[in-house]
Image (cartoon, grey):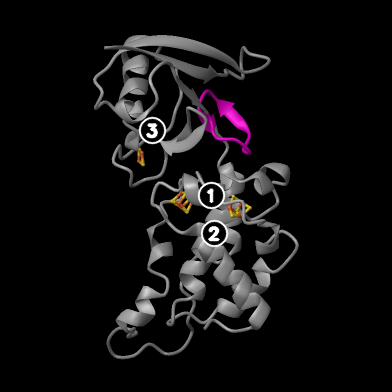
């Protein structure tokens, strides 16, 4: 079947502002939106710019707005979208570089700000630092993040103020705050309790709906708010 794909285009060298361009593509219902973009780039317009790497929902590089919702192009099948033209646009809230490519630097700066790594200066045991299955379960959900930015760039609080650390950074802080082997939880809670931390979240839930890994993001943010309020991780 033939499908119309309407893409927001922007070339900083020639365009004053972004504009839409519509392509007609032969597609199967089981094609992914990434397949359509590859066909357009390969056979119709080699200048089309978008990020992708793994094509299997692992690397997180091809998050974009597809029919108005943040999704991974490599995980979105044509047959799962409403019939008619498929509209593809770059993520909101980050500066546009070219076509579907946005500047991810502010996103990763927020990520780095929450210390997304294990901190433990105690002498290591002879073997590994042990952890029970129950302790591991406490942060299992937030280990699944692939840093695609679909959550942060769907959050109205982030759109209104890009200094908000955003749900992706909070998810990755949660992953370590609730890890029984880590010793920097209090420091991360202090970072997240400042004016651009968790209290910028107004429980809008867009982040949870957008996450391709189905992480319960709003729940994780709530757990961090509770930990800050009570001073306890229980
Ligand atoms: Fe992407 Fe989900 Fe991680 Fe947000 S929490 S960056 S939506 S994988
Ligand atoms: Fe934004 Fe998600 Fe909170 S959309 S306001 S971070 S629940
Ligand atoms: Fe890697 Fe889609 S290309 S997640």
Callout 1 secondary element: helix
Within 8 Å of ligand 3, the CB of disc 3? yes
Question: As displayed, is residue 42 above or below residue 74?
Answer: above
Kindly identify which residue carries mark 1.
207
Q: Is mark 2 within 8 Å of ligand 2?
A: yes
Range shown magenta: 90-101
Q: CA distance from mark 1 to mark 2?
A: 7 Å
| Mark 2, other Cα within 10 Å: few <14 / some 14–19 / many ≥20 | many
> Which numbered marker is on residue 40?
none
Q: Is residue 47 visible?
A: no
How far from the left and from the top, in percent, is residue 138? Answer: 41, 75
Q: Nearer the viewer, residue 97 or 140?
A: 140
Q: Is residue 85 visible?
A: yes
Q: Which residue is mark 2?
A: 218
Q: Nearer the viewer, mark 2 or mark 3?
A: 2
- Which residue corresponds to mark 3? 73
- Seen from the viewer's position, the closer of residues 147 and 98 is 147
Question: Is 52 located above or below residue 211 in the figure?
Answer: above
């Amino acid at each position: 079947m033939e499908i119309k794909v309407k893409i927001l285009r922007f070339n900083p060298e020639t365009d004053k502002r972004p504009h839409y361009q519509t392509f007609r593509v032969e597609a199967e219902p089981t094609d992914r939106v990434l397949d359509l973009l590859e066909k357009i780039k390969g056979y119709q317009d080699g200048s089309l710019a978008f990020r992708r790497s793994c094509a299997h929902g692992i690397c997180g590089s091809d998050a974009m707005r597809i029919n108005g919702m943040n999704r991974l192009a490599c995980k979105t099948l044509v047959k799962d979208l409403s019939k008619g033209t498929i509209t593809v646009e770059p993520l909101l809230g980050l500066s546009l570089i070219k076509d579907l490519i946005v500047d991810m630097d502010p996103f990763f700066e927020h990520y780095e700000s929450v210390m997304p790594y294990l901190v433990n200066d105690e002498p290591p045991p002879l073997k590994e630092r042990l952890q029970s299955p129950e302790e591991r379960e406490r942060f299992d959900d937030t280990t699944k993040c692939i840093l695609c930015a679909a959550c942060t760039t769907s959050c109205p609080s982030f759109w209104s103020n890009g200094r908000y650390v955003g749900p992706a950074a909070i998810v990755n802080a949660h992953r370590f705050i609730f890890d029984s082997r880590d010793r920097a939880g209090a420091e991360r809670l202090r970072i997240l309790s400042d004016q651009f931390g968790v209290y910028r979240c107004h429980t809008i839930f867009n982040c949870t709906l957008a996450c391709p890994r189905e992480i319960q993001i709003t729940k994780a943010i709530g757990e961090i708010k509770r930990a800050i309020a009570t001073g306890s991780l229980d």
